[in-house]
Image (tube, helix red, strand yellow):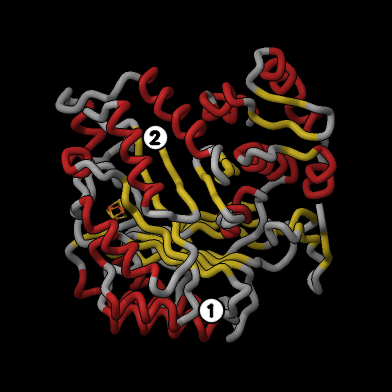
Amino acid sequence: MTQRSDATGFVTDESDSVPSAPFFWARPRAAYIHIPFCAHKCGYCDFASVAGQDDAIDRFLSALDREMASQLTPGTVVDTIFVGGGTPTYVSAKQLDRYLDRLNHWFQVSPDVEFTVESNPNTLTAEKVAILANHGVNRVSLGAQSFRPHLLKQLERNHDPASVGRAIDLLRKRFDNISIDLIFGIPGQTQKEWEEDLETSLSLEPNHISAYGLTYEKGTPLWKQRKLGIVEPIDENIEATMYEHLMDRLNLNGWEQYEISNFARGRKKCRHNLYYWANAPYYGFGTGAAAFQNNRRTLNLRPLITYMERVESGESPICQSEVLESESRARETAILNLRRTEGISRVNFIETTGHRIDDLAGDPIRQFVEHGLLIDDGETICFSRAGFLLADGILARIV
Ligand code: SF4
């Protein structure tokens, strides 16, 4: 592994430009900005998103700018900027131009910075694509989810399958780093339909695919439908087969699985997410945004109006704040590191946390290794293929 130290004392793996050690007390090198507005609320959505509140967009953007002003100096240097939501491209072209201008004011944007904006297919126009590119955005993550009308309907998505191809055609003119989000395990979805969704995605030639099994988040309309028996989850064995197919199909032909649900080709791993899984510090702005700075985890208020009122009156929008004890930070680092296919490096772990992974979780690790769910070569611990299928349960035991 080639490494270099930068001016801040980070040690950086040049292959992915993500610091490996030591960084808990360092200044954040990643920034997350949350734009909560959507055209409508999808049935499974538990994100901090709002629909039907377009009148508040300009007011929100002013509050967002004020929140950034409270923490940043103009030209703050970061390695990654990630604008998520919500649907960051749902706002008008003028509003998109406005907030990207401000991000260019607060952050030093350059071709070396990975600058991602999440988008939904039917919110992109040639004008918006040009605005994104002209402001230094160099990565777009597109929420396709499925290419089957009945499955999009089940998810209460409001785009049609053809709009994904149209959006990619528009993006291709300015972007060579495009990610597609997919969901599998949707009620009514067959194995064949999932395999075809994956093939359709590959035919669009993205550089990155994120694929998640559908989750029934408490309180969502989909969760209620499941409780009432209106919706029946698919058999967990079928869902496992879908995930196995995903790994088999994508770990071929230049694709690389680098995390439980994330796959890249052409070295286009999402650097921003690699920061999260390294448990490195990051800024967070906007409704419901999490941040990790000075060993403190914070969470912003989710309700739009309360967030704006707080910021407008000069108060902090933070609603939760926790200083992490050394051991809990180390345990958190363990489960975040383990999500990556490269797993936990014993040397890096002790350098970054001050703890030996074997002191924290030696027993469960040994047991999972005996059951063939983890692989331990003495230097690193990582999931086996069978382990990836049971990742959530294993990560819970490691905690
Ligand atoms: S588009 Fe995304 S953020 Fe918006 S409601 Fe649907 S799932 Fe939630």
* Residue 234 placement: quadrant: top left
Circle 1 residue: 70
If the image is split into quadrants, where does the C terminus sit?
top right
Name the side, left or right, on which 207 lies relative to 230.
right
Specify whether residue 257 is in view. Answer: yes
Q: Which SS class for mark 1?
A: loop
In this rendering, position of residue 255 left or right of residue 140: right
Q: Is residue 174 left or right of residue 218?
A: right
Residue matched to label 2: 213
Q: Position of residue 163 (x, y in %)?
A: 23, 58
Of pointers 2 and 1, the one earlier in the residue sequence: 1
Q: Amino acid at mark 2?
A: Gly
For badge 1, the amino acid type reads Ser
Seen from the viewer's position, the closer of residues 131 and 225 is 131
Instruction: Please identify the quarter of the rendering in which residue 269 is found.
Output: bottom right
Question: Residue 298's x, y, as percent?
Answer: 54, 57
Residue at left 46%, top 58%? 319
